[in-house]
Amino acid sequence: MLDDLDRSLVHALHLDGRAPFSRIAAVLGVSTQTVTRRYRRLQADAALRVVGLPDPHRAGRAQWLVRLTASPHTAQDLAQAMARRADTSWVKLASGGTEIVAVVDTPSGADSGHSLVLHDIPRTAGITAVSSHYLLHTYLGGPTAWRGRADILTSRQQDQLRPPGGPDGSRAASAGKSQSARKTQSAGKDLAPTDRELLRVLAQDGRAGQAELAAATGWSPATVARRLADLRASGAVFFDVEVDAALFGAATQALLWMAVPPAHLDHVATALARHDELAFVSATTGPTNLVAQALCPGPAALHHYLTRRLGTLDAIRALETSPVLRTVKAAGPLTPGTPVVRRASPGSRRRG
């Protein structure tokens, strides 16, 4: 388990993944050396990583949640193959090791070319079922952190750590302007093909320095700083924090597949997004049109959540619970030399 300083550092990085260690140290009331040392230790012991990610809609991408059922041996190999793909994230082994769940990115709109969601799954007789669910709207997740690891800093500390040019500030600043003025103000803040190298480096390390970003893009450090500030302010790029959830007491994880009448879907999803036990809530296509990820201290806590909280929502007509054994790949790409399979146990040194 992490101590209060570790948790405060993780919370600070959720607020601003690129905040200088000196600023984090000043807000937390410790030395810069202490923050740096804790960050390095969390990298080694809790698989801590900050990753810079594009907003999929702004990047012209569609996201699908794919479920594949296979024999236990086939599932292990298939999960590793899925994790190595550049178009996947959040690859998980679930349901006793017989199911793989992954988010797959595909081109959207006119650029899609009717592309297949999974055009090159390894051919194997071990796969017994495949289903794809289009992510229609995310209510919790992405830029919004799980409250279980972003709940320790005071409101004043959070205000001191939030980046000054965040998306909310940009919208507030443009309120009252004419439509043409807002378009002019946001010009250049959408993702462009020239941002490809910038995004590639940030996906590996969201805290990469200006010199490294400049070398990768061929831009000057000043140009990198301006471009990144624009993309962050517009919400086109956000920063996520990968860390072993078990170290925050979430030893039991499960995916919840729910069927809700369309007339009640938004109300139920909005209510679920306020539940501290959930880290992800999204509306999808398919017979189960709402999916969530639960993070609980143990099986008893998950049972209590399902029966005492989720069970009180009468609009949920059906529920399937899939326990997550481990997370094979999180939000960012696998780094060279990193083992693919990561344990999800409390004593693990790999992210869950």
Image: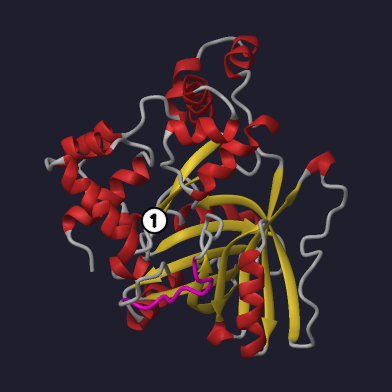
Q: Residue at x 74, y 52 (%)?
A: 106
What residue is disc 1 on? 146
User: In the rendered view of the protein, which quadrant contains the N terminus?
Assistant: bottom left
Q: Residue at x 74, y 83 (%)?
A: 127
Kindly tell me whether residue 309 is visible in this rendering: no
User: In the rendered view of the protein, which quadrant contains the C terminus?
Assistant: bottom left
The residue lying furthest to the right in this view is: 113
Q: x and y percent of residue 201 in the render? A: 54, 43
Task: Using the image, determine if residue 193 lies above or below residue 239.
Answer: above
Kindly tell me whether residue 69 is visible in this rendering: yes
Give the side of residue 250 with respect to residue 23, left or right.
right
Kindly state the secondary structure of the residue where label 1 is placed.
Answer: loop
Q: Residue at x 63, y 89 (%)?
A: 73
Give the side of residue 168 with respect to residue 296, left or right.
right
> Magenta region: which residues?
338-346
Residue in the foreground of this view, choosing between 50 and 238: 50
Amino acid type, residue under disc 1 in the picture: Trp
Residue in the foreground of this view, choosing between 14 and 298: 14
Give the side of residue 284 with respect to residue 215, left or right.
right
Residue in the foreground of this view, choosing between 300 and 123: 123
Question: Residue 164 falls in which quadrant of the image?
Answer: top left
Determine the main secondary structure of the stretch shown in magenta.
loop
Task: Using the image, determine if residue 306 lies above or below residue 276.
Answer: below
